[in-house]
Image: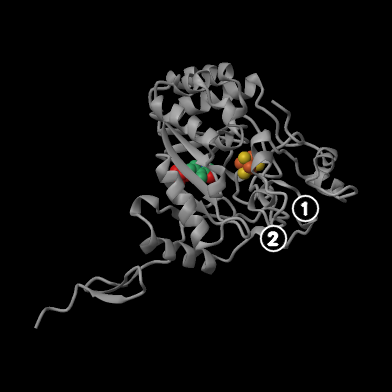
Amino acid sequence: MSDALKTVGDLEASGLAPAHSGLDAVAKKYAIGITPAVLDLIDRSDPTDPMARQFVPTRAELVTTPDERVDPIGDLAHSPVTGIVHRYPDRVLLKAVHVCPVYCRFCFRREMVGPQGLGTLTGDELDAAIAYIAAHTEIWEVILTGGDPLVLSPRRLRDLMERLAEIEHVRIVRFHTRVPVVEPERIDAAMVDALKASGKTTYLAVHANHPRELTPAARAGFDLLLAGGIALISQTVLLRGVNDSVETLAELMRGFVENRIRPYYLHHPDLAPGTGHFRVSIAEGQALVAALRGRISGLCQPTYVLDIPGGYGKADIGATSIVGSDGCFTVRDWQGGEHAYPPKAPD
Ligand SMILES: *Cc1c(COP(=O)(O)O)cnc(C)c1O
Ligand code: SF4
């Protein structure tokens, strides 16, 4: 297997960026990472290729807007100990690593991930994070994110899972990862065993943004995870020039369901620095989600969410299809028709 592309030199040598691309200033701020599996998906003949757009850096990232922020979703405001984000009572994020196999150009944690990022928890920090979870009996779910937790070796993941196994009040362990799509060869029997080693109910949220990411190799990984008893859900970021069309979103959501992955979240893009070229408006997002409603199966409907800047958590921002109050609602159907509820009494 060849290595990931990690430098401007690598990009120029592979032809993904022109010689003297002027990307050094971007590379100084944000990490670069393109795995062999992703490289295979990039269509070099298409100047608007949605795969290249997600992973190949551009100078547009040097442009920041006044509303963008270094910590767009307020992780730091809710971090009681290093590596833990505790925003909702019953669940915590455990960020053991800040490394990813790829570096998405729109990443909401781009200031924290990568070689210059927050690094990997030390042994002492991990002990303190686990002690925090053990001490807080209201924590029902531990969500491993990062970075990408699946960059850890199966041995290290197993150690971590075995420590969570001892905490009785934790019932669910959830992983958020891009590995099954961008480095599918990591999903093997040893990895699946490690992910299950907590003995808890395990969910894995697959991050994918374009139907082309659901390759046969990715599918093989999903099948192994599912055969191991791990439930799969999806997460997608709505991105201009990548998936901001009804056709693309419909194909992606159907692709998830065909792979036995239940669509979970469609994220409105966060206000991460240098990502303005990816942002769609909320009105556009609402129109896309409304159009999906009637067009594809209910199994294929994600929840459209916004992480409220400042650390206030996620809000469902799909356009509401009901207005009014008790006794007098107007309900909108999937084709835009409006109906009274309760309906008028028949004559
Ligand atoms: C997104 C997030 C979660 C998980 O939210 P769900 O709605 O349960 O998926 C938990 N904690 C933090 C800090 C988050 O940002
Ligand atoms: S895999 Fe996730 S955390 Fe890593 S760069 Fe992409 S969006 Fe950011």
Closer to the camera in the image, 45 or 193: 45
Residue 36 in view, yes or no = yes
Residue 52 as seen in the image, left or right of residue 340: right
Rendered location of residue 231, percent (x, y): 40, 34
Callout 1, which amino acid?
A: Thr
Task: Give the mark nearest the N terminus, 2 or 1.
Answer: 1
User: Which residue position is annotated with label 1?
Assistant: 58
Indicate whether 343 appears above or below 74: below
Closer to the camera in the image, 186 or 170: 186
Rendered location of residue 47, percent (x, y): 72, 57
Quarter holding the C terminus?
bottom left
Q: Quadrant of residue 157?
A: top right
Indicate whether 38 appears above or below 306: above
Disc number placed over residue 277 in the picture, else none: 2
Neighbor class of circle 1 (other Cα within 10 Å; few <14, some 14-19, many 20+) is: some
Give me the residue at 47% from left, 53% from top.
251
Disc number placed over residue 43 in the picture, else none: none
Q: Are marks 2 and 1 in contact (CB under 8 Å)?
A: yes
Kindly give the residue lying farthest to the right in the view shown.
Answer: 20
Assign a secondary structure to mark 1. loop
Count the marks: 2
Would the CB of label 2 be found within 8 Å of ligand 2?
A: no
Kindly give the residue lying farthest to the bottom in the view shown.
Answer: 347
Whole-number angstrom distance, CA of label 2 to CA of label 1: 10 Å
Callout 2, which amino acid?
A: His
Indicate whether 248 appears above or below 188: below
Assign a secondary structure to mark 2. helix
Give me the residue at 19% from left, 75% from top.
343
Quarter holding the N terminus?
top right
Rendered location of residue 39, percent (x, y): 69, 40
